[in-house]
Amino acid sequence: MAQRTVAQGVSIRLACLAFCISQTCYRYQAKHSAENVEIADLLIRLTHNQRNWGFGLCFLYLRNVCH
């Protein structure tokens, strides 16, 4: 919403103030990497094979396996 408001001519500062977000948050650009794709694939396979595991077990497993 803030980006649309800025596109209509409102300043970034005023748009961020109106939507209660920081200017840093407004300017943030996510960095996609091949590592994220690999982790997502591992997580999908893990949750498919271990349906009774919650987030905690999946996190610990991936943290210990993916060094």
Image: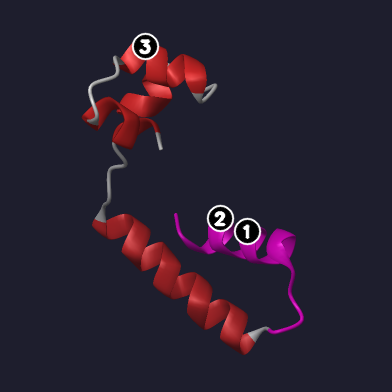
Quarter residue 6 falls in: top left
Classify the position of the N terminus by image quarter.
top left
Q: Which residue is mark 3?
A: 13
Check disc 1 and report its element: helix, strand or loop. helix
- Are there few (<14), some (14-19), or many (20+) residues within 10 Å of tag 2? few
- Discs 3/2, front: 3
Front residue of 30 and 43 = 30
Quarter residue 37 falls in: bottom left
- Discs 2/1, front: 1
Residue 33 lies, in percent from the top left, at: 26, 52
Q: Is residue 2 above or below residue 64?
A: above
> Which residue is drawn at the image coordinates 32% and 57% (left, top)?
35
Q: Tag 1: residue type?
A: Phe
Front residue of 9 and 55 = 9
Check disc 3 and report its element: helix, strand or loop. helix
Q: Tag 3: residue type?
A: Arg
Residue 9 lies, in percent from the top left, at: 23, 22
Residue 26 lies, in percent from the top left, at: 37, 27
Q: Which residue is mark 2?
A: 63
- Are there few (<14), some (14-19), or many (20+) residues within 10 Å of tag 1? few
Counting every numbered tag in the picture gives 3
> Is 64 part of what is drawn in magenta?
yes
Q: Which residue is mark 1?
A: 59
Check disc 2 and report its element: helix, strand or loop. helix
Prevalent SS, magenta region: helix
Q: Is residue 27 left or right of residue 67?
A: left
